[in-house]
Amino acid sequence: MFPPEQVRTFLSVAQTLSFTQAAASLGLGQPTVSQHIRKLERAVGRPLLIRDTRTVRLTVDGEAMVGFARSILSANTAAAEYFTGPGVRGRLRFGVTDDLALTRVPHILRDFRHLNPGITLDLTVSQGAYLERRVESGHVDIAFLKTTAGEGRGQLVRRDRLVWAAAEGSGLPWGEDRPVPLIVWQAPSPSRALAVRALEDAGIRYRVVCTARGVNAVLAATRAGLGVAIFTRSLLPHDLVELSCGSGLPELGELDLVLLTNRSAPAESVEALTSTILAHSNPIRPRV
């Protein structure tokens, strides 16, 4: 409705309160500046400037137009950069498990958006099994999740050791007459499977005291002292205690943090996100 060149001219006049200075700053002739202002005022239907031989002043509508002018020019610049600038464009559907979402993922998404402003991101936070199904069905393009170490599926981001953890001072004795109280993820879960296998191979009795359907449920149950939970070491919160070998619990092994990609996913967008994630691949403790 309002041509950018007319809006730009008006804003220059409004800032300098001088047709002469505005013409010089824009590299236009003064008659052209006057013409732009007249056309803009006709389009608006109201006078924007009061001018005589010596002064130029903004009307009330002119003062309001200053704010609109800045918005119009900003939107015009953003649109031009989007359609003519470099970079990957399109839509990318990204899934991440809720425990991984508590670590570097916000930083990853911030950097990804900064580097790839043309990509629209659809984000799904859920459990790994659900995300795997969504990738396989074509509803998620790329998912960041945990798998059993050495399976060789997807792009390996890093390998992380599993540890037993409990609330500090929770006092959870176990022995021949008392099974290990376990807090586990809802099946199927690679960490749950490894924990159960390790206990059974070691001949240690256990009892599932809580089945959790998300990381917040695991954290709440563990912090309440209900039992022992399983975490990857880099995802262990500061307020929980890693149980040492002296606790009598067996070694748990490792998990792989991987990226699973749908075959039909947009290759350039997937590569852009993969590169950003790998750049943040050093382990970091979550702030939970």
Image (tube, rainbow, N blue to C red):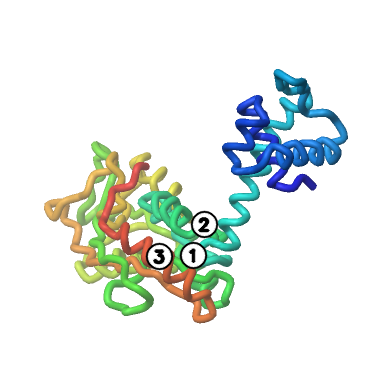
SS assignment at label 3: strand
Which residue is at 69% across, 37% downward? 30
Instruction: Specify the amino acid type for callout 1.
Output: Gly
The image quarter containing residue 32 is top right
**Is residue 171 found left or right of 45 in the rendered image?**
left
Which residue is at 26% across, 57% downward? 282
Front residue of 138 and 239? 138
**Is residue 200 found left or right of 126 in the rendered image?**
left
Instruction: Specify the amino acid type for callout 2.
Output: Pro
Separation of disc 1 and disc 3 at Cα? 27 Å
Q: What crowding class fits label 1: few (fewer than 14 Cα within 10 Å), some (14-19), or many (20 or more)?
A: some
SS assignment at label 1: loop
Q: Position of residue 162 (x, y in %)?
A: 26, 60
Separation of disc 1 and disc 2 at Cα? 8 Å
SS assignment at label 2: loop
Front residue of 8 and 247? 8
Q: Are marks 3 and 2 in contact (CB under 8 Å)?
A: no
Query: Eyeballing the image, is 142 above or below 220?
Result: below
